[in-house]
Amino acid sequence: MSDNSMYNNAKTWQIGFFSLNNAATNLHFNLFSLYFLVYCTEFWKLNPVLVGTIMMLSRLLDAFTDPAIGYFIDKTETRFGKFRPYMVLGSLIINISLVAMFWGVKFDSRIAVLAWLTIWYFIWVVGYTFQTIITKAGQVVLSNNPSQRPIFVGFDGFFSMAVFILISAGINPVLLHFGGTEDPAGWRFVAFTVILLNTVFTVLAVIGLSKKDRKEYFIENRETKRVRIMDFIPVIKKNRALQMLIVSASTNKLANVTLNASIVYFFMYVMQNLRLQSTIMPIIGLCGVAGAFLAMGIAMKTSNRTSFVFGTWMSIVSIAVILVFRPFSPGLVPIAIVLFGFMSFFNGIANNIILVMIPDTADYETWSNGKFIPGMISTTFSFVDKAVSALGGLLVGIALSGYTSGMEVTPRLYWSILFVFLGVPLLGHIASAIAMKWYPITREFYNKMIREINERKNVGTAAATESD
């Protein structure tokens, strides 16, 4: 049993409040992943392949800005801390961008519409990076106790799934109330609600991190101070834990992006009842929350790696069962709910535990290379994650090539939607499971890292005191 005194521990309420930073950004992520393509095709009547391309290129372009953002986070020292300023700045940027895109501003030409959406979508993605990176990087100073860090998963799973249920099940009734997807009033109400909730969650998250976002919790040494912006390349080359997590998490993310982006079309053309979405998604969402809590329990007793591997393999099994039986006809809706519930439950285990594995790889970097660079570790992870997951919007757009608003279902449309909704997630989870075979951080290995990091830190502090 490890000695808790060697860890930087946090209070439970601090972990809970800080987890709301991810809920704040997930409000935006879920809105855009579920409804941006719908908004563009139904309200603006744009070609889905073109919109999917815009989404992909914007995320790819932003991916190349990530290492720079991480570099500046690691070099930042203000009276408000290293991390909190970026949380606030990111929240402001994404909320302003949301108004610009979803307010239904009219243009005389389609080219003007595309230019407007492209510019603001890119700005939104950059702001989204500012805020989401802190969810990953801030955990390094919040707590490094392997029995405590997974608590974040429980809070995050509950809050994020509540947000997912709100967006996936709540927007359709709002849009129908205001006159459907072609009426700007409904989209404006949705935008206002998301902005309000994002602001409240961000403020609470800032409070949660306030006592930990201080210099005494940063591990600064010669190696850290010598870090340059181009050092993200050797970080990828040398950090084996980060390498394997990037492969596993990015393919997992691709699975979730394609599934989310095709949910509305799945209920429209496969289940052939869009109203079922508002009925089924809350049930599925609750199953995901249960999965997050199981992920927390497994990780606290064994390791984050064990929790992720278990959730990933069980996700593969559950998706395969759905594809074999395809319970999509009206008379099989109860069976569909049960099977989708299992899929969401196991995906909730794998998907939620990733967030606490990222700070583990930052600790691995400090242990192996002597560099305290949580910002660069998080953005290096995000760089590859975005490059892969950016394909999600494009894949859905390609699957819907030839689609026009209100068209009748065809065999090609049916199977294309089924492929992006279930086929791509299945392949993504398989790739994740394979990559985890080479992920090195077990519980025993993590405890060894923290002990050695503390020993080096104590030696460095003693040397500095003697020199003074």
Image (tube, grey):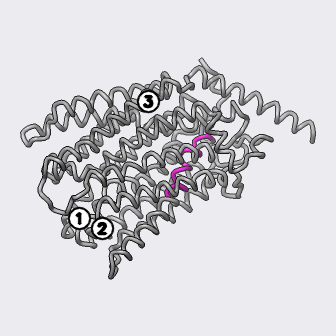
Question: What residue sits right under mark 3 in the picture?
Answer: 308
Crowd rating for badge 3 (residues with CA inside 10 Å; few <14, some 14–19, many 20+):
many
Residue 96 point in image, percent of width and height: 46, 69
Considering every residue shown, the one lying at the far left of the view is: 331
Question: What residue sits right under mark 2 in the picture?
Answer: 187
Determine contact: label 1, label 2, CB under 8 Å. Answer: yes
Residue drawn where x is 62% and y is 20% of the image: 2
Q: In this view, does 354 lie above or below 99?
A: above
Which quadrant holds residue 137?
top right
Q: In this view, does 224 lie above or below 398?
A: above
Q: Can residue 297 be seen in this view?
A: no
Disc 1 or 2, which lies upstream in sequence? Answer: 1
Say which of marks 3 and 1 sits in front.
3
Crowd rating for badge 2 (residues with CA inside 10 Å; few <14, some 14–19, many 20+):
many
Circle 2: residue type = Trp
Circle 3: residue type = Phe
Residue drawn where x is 50% and y is 33% of the image: 150
Considering every residue shown, the one lying at the far top of the view is: 1
Q: Is mark 3 on a helix, strand or loop?
A: helix
Question: What residue sits right under mark 1 in the picture?
Answer: 175
Q: Looking at the magenta stretch, what is its main secondary structure?
A: helix
User: Is-magenta flag for residue 14?
Assistant: no
Determine contact: label 3, label 1, CB under 8 Å. Answer: no
In the image, is 422 to the left or to the right of 460? left
Q: Can residue 276 be seen in this view?
A: yes
Q: What element carries label 1?
A: helix
Circle 1: residue type = Leu
